Image (cartoon, grey):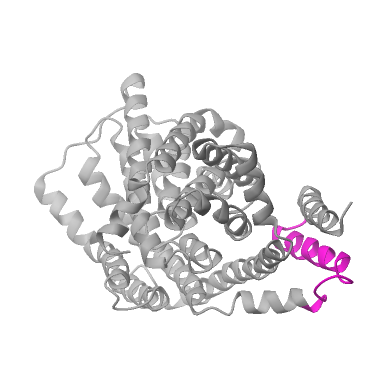
């Protein structure tokens, strides 16, 4: 057996063994990478390569956007923005069959898009909507399932930290601005598909409608939510127009959210300490994941794993349709046990050369990968959104699963559409010249 094959086997076996033993993902990545380099030390790079690659991996101006967007999301979560978005969404669609479910989806789409965080959407919207929906006759598991799945739309609709991470992992093949534009239609499509399921459930179970509101009430709620919604226009519009970079937009989002929170009266000086502390914890976790993942990504390249996988798939399967389906299934499985950031950083350099050789645009593949992993966030055993949503709703994960499965199937259907209809991802970037 060649040293190259031994190295590849050691890398994957040690990584999955450590994960199975309960070692945190970042440590599993770092340890398995270091062990593999130790085996190769007589034939290849020295052990210091790991620390070098970890350091250079986060030496990127674009990555500064992530801590800023995390901070902006924390400010928004505490700054009264969620309530205003919910009230506006309720005035807009609350009187339709399944109206409160629609409100949850639309409010989560808006909150996730403004904050760039699925967790902020799930916790901020879910903590308010679950009790309201139960009072109106919705079952608690169904309400939690809607909250969990709709929160994923904020990872597709910009600004999205995950799309920034993918832009880094793609090695510049996909720009942040193009990815932001590409995420709109798939993100909205997921939201619409979820609302179709909610509407069907509301019709069959005869769930109540909300009260019809006057145009005056609708205008009032829109006016109260206007400056929150304007943040989305400022950030994404500025990036697309080339006025500022994603990093500068993230910094503007922090200032804007802070001013907005204080002007609403929901954000106090005493909140600054907890907000900064929580943001620092999340940022440290994300950055350490990026550090170790970039070291492993370099090792993939050194061991020629992407080339080997490309040759294998092209040799065994002649149809791009089949290969894309296999990659989707693989990513869906990966998403069930691995968090989104390390999965993007690890599997982008493996699969991106395969799909680009088959003619898929890197931006298109980025949306496919993120949508795949969004589904994984809603599934056990490591679905972060699943646990956040169940915690907010104060019910067990097992109670949620029956209501969650139809919504997950709907998301998979949207994934297949996005995979095989490239225009859903590429039409808007093409319209703006990307």
- Percent of width and height locating residue 303: 74, 61
Q: Is residue 242 above or below residue 166?
A: below
Q: Is residue 403 above or below residue 220?
A: above
Classify residue 34 by image quadrant.
Answer: bottom right
Classify residue 129 by image quadrant.
Answer: top left
Q: Is residue 46 magenta?
A: yes
Q: Could you tell me if residue 82 is visible in this image?
A: no
- Percent of width and height locating residue 415: 45, 40
Majority secondary structure in the magenta region: helix
Question: Residue drawn 39% across and 65% down?
Answer: 76
Question: Residue drawn 35% across and 77% down?
Answer: 252
Q: Is residue 86 magenta?
A: no
- Percent of width and height locating residue 378: 54, 43
Q: Is residue 105 left or right of residue 387?
A: left
Q: Tell me which segment is drawn in magenta.
A: 23-48
Question: Residue drawn 51% across and 30% down?
Answer: 405
Residue found at the very far top of the displayed protein: 204
User: Across the whole image, how many numbered discs are drawn on residues?
Assistant: 0
Q: Is residue 145 above or below residue 242?
A: above
Image quadrant for the C terminus?
Answer: bottom left
């Amino acid at each position: 057996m060649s040293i190259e094959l031994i190295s590849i086997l050691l890398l994957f076996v040690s990584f999955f063994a450590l994960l199975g033993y309960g070692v945190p993902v970042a440590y599993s990545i770092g340890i398995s990478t270091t062990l593999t380099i130790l085996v190769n030390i007589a034939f290849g790079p020295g052990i210091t390569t790991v620390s070098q690659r970890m350091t250079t991996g986060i030496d990127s101006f674009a990555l500064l956007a992530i801590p800023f967007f995390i901070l902006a999301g924390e400010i928004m979560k505490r700054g009264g923005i969620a309530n205003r978005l919910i009230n506006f969404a309720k005035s807009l669609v609350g009187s339709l069959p399944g109206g409160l479910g629609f409100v949850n989806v639309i409010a989560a789409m808006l909150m996730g898009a403004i904050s760039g965080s699925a967790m902020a959407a799930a916790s901020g919207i879910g903590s308010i909507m679950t009790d309201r929906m139960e009072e109106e006759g919705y079952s608690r598991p169904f309400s939690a399932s809607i909250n969990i799945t709709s929160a994923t739309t904020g990872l597709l609709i910009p600004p999205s930290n995950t799309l920034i991470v993918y832009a880094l992992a793609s090695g510049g093949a996909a720009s942040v601005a193009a990815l932001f534009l590409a995420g709109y239609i798939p993100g909205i499509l997921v939201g619409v598909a979820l609302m179709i399921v909610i509407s069907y459930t509301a019709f069959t179970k005869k769930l109540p409608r909300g009260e019809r509101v006057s145009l005056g009430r609708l205008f009032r709620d829109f006016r109260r939510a206007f400056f929150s919604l304007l943040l989305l226009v400022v950030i994404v519009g500025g990036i697309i127009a080339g006025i500022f970079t994603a990093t500068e937009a993230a910094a503007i989002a922090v200032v804007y959210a802070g001013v907005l929170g204080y002007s609403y009266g929901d954000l106090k000086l005493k909140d600054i300490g907890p907000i900064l502390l929580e943001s620092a914890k999340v940022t440290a976790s994300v950055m350490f994941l990026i550090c170790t993942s970039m070291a492993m990504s370099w090792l993939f390249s050194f061991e020629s794993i992407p080339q080997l996988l490309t040759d294998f798939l092209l040799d065994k399967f002649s149809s791009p349709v089949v290969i894309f389906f296999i990659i989707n299934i693989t990513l869906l499985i990966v998403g069930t046990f691995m968090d989104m950031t390390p999965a993007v950083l690890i599997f982008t350099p493996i699969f991106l050369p395969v799909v680009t050789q088959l003619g898929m645009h890197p931006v298109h593949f980025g949306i496919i990968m993120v949508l795949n992993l969004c589904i994984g966030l809603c599934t056990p055993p490591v679905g972060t959104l699943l646990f956040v949503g169940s915690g907010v709703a104060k019910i067990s994960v097992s109670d949620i699963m029956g209501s969650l499965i139809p919504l997950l199937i709907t998301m998979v259907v949207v994934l297949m559409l996005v995979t095989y209809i490239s225009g859903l991802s590429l039409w808007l970037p093409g319209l703006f010249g990307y």
